[in-house]
Amino acid sequence: MAQVQPVQGLTPDMVTRCELVAVRGVPLPSDTAELWGQIWGFQARPDDLLICTYPKAGTTWIQEIVDMIQQDGDPQKCCRAPIYERIPFLELCPPRPLPRGFEEAAAMPPPRTLKTHLPLELVPPSFWEQDCKVIYVARNPKDNAVSYFHFQRMNQSLPAPGRWDQYLQTFVAGGVPWGSWFDHVRAWWDARDEHRILYLFYEDIKQDLRGEIQKVGRFLGRELPEPVLETIVERTSFESMRENPMANYSTLPPFVFDHAVSPFMRKGTVGDWTTQFTVAQSEWFDAEWAQRMEGSDLRFCTRL
């Protein structure tokens, strides 16, 4: 793990587990909700690229893939700063004197690549008005729930998750930060033909990293010569990223992300849910899935 570098202006007393506040029915961190007007009014540009995921669905993975493509596979350029500085998190609103995500984004020169976890209905309208490209990544809900549970354990700025059995109930009910997984993935899926949205699956990236990188490259209009593609494949493997301090969030102090509780990059597998769910929990979840996703043609791989 990389040596922790101090984040300028950030002290332990500034980091507390947040409350959730509903914004148009979606539970968001209270600091985000407090500044919602400024987030909603964010001005997108036509050449912006928006990366969107439900939390813990492969966000950092796709960010690193995109940055590597944009930097023509140059590892040094992709190590210019931690991933959270290279690609601003639009609705992140840390306490002052730290900049808000939308402020960092506004100060960036074009073309900008931005990150969000917002559900479709909460994305600032200027992104649609400017016809921006969006890359969305979805992950099967059982693995997503397990990963999110461990992330809330280690992320000292989000609500404590409690026991796993309690958390699973809250996850299915949509009471976790950024709301319902079901609503999130389904709304973005249904909108994929109305906007310039590339809808990807975590499991596909895991199974065919090379092919999915090529798909992203085509969406971005970037040629990927074989040597460049090989470098990107190597540098964006889970094993490589887990050891990369510019991608694994080890540069954040433990009073923000406590890797002793759970590493940010934990396993990166498909099917890890089988180690966490009981048989009864899995059967109950399957019944909830059938009810909540009725009528949708969205399908997920839960094992490889």
Image (cartoon, rainbow, N blue to C red):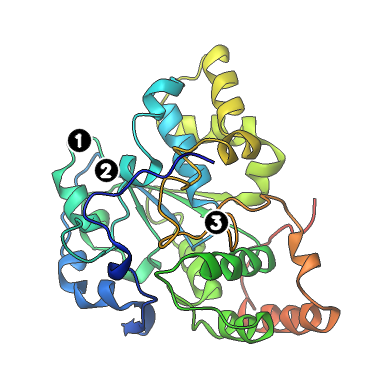
Side (left or right) of 4 relative to 7: right
Q: Secondary structure at mark 2?
A: loop
Marks 3 and 1: which is nearer the front?
Answer: 3
Marks 3 and 2: which is nearer the front?
Answer: 3
Q: Are marks 1 and 2 in contact (CB under 8 Å)?
A: yes
Q: Label 2 is placed on what type of residue?
A: Asp
Q: Quadrant of residue 24?
A: bottom left
Q: Earlier in the sequence, mark 3 or mark 2?
A: 2
Q: Quadrant of residue 86?
A: top left
Q: Earlier in the sequence, mark 3 or mark 1?
A: 1
Q: Choose between 12 and 112: the one closer to the eye.
A: 12
Which residue sits at x=26%, y=74%?
Answer: 31
Residue 177, above or below 236? below
- On the image, the x and y values in percent for residue 299 come to 68, 62
State the residue position of label 1.
110
Question: Is residue 274 in sight in this rendering?
Answer: yes
Q: Earlier in the sequence, mark 1 or mark 2?
A: 2
Q: Which numbered circle lies on residue 259?
A: 3
Q: Label 1 is placed on what type of residue?
A: Pro
Give the spatial CA distance, label 3 vs label 1: 34 Å
Give the spatial CA distance, label 3 vs label 2: 32 Å
Q: Secondary structure at mark 1?
A: loop
Q: Which numbered circle lies on residue 48?
A: 2
- On the image, the x and y values in percent for residue 159 come to 45, 78
> Within 10 angstroms of label 3, few (less than 14), some, or many (20 or more) residues?
many
Which residue sits at x=16%, y=54%?
Answer: 103
> Within 10 angstroms of label 2, few (less than 14), some, or many (20 or more) residues?
some
Which residue sits at x=56%, y=74%?
Answer: 182
- On the image, the x and y values in percent for residue 279 come to 85, 79
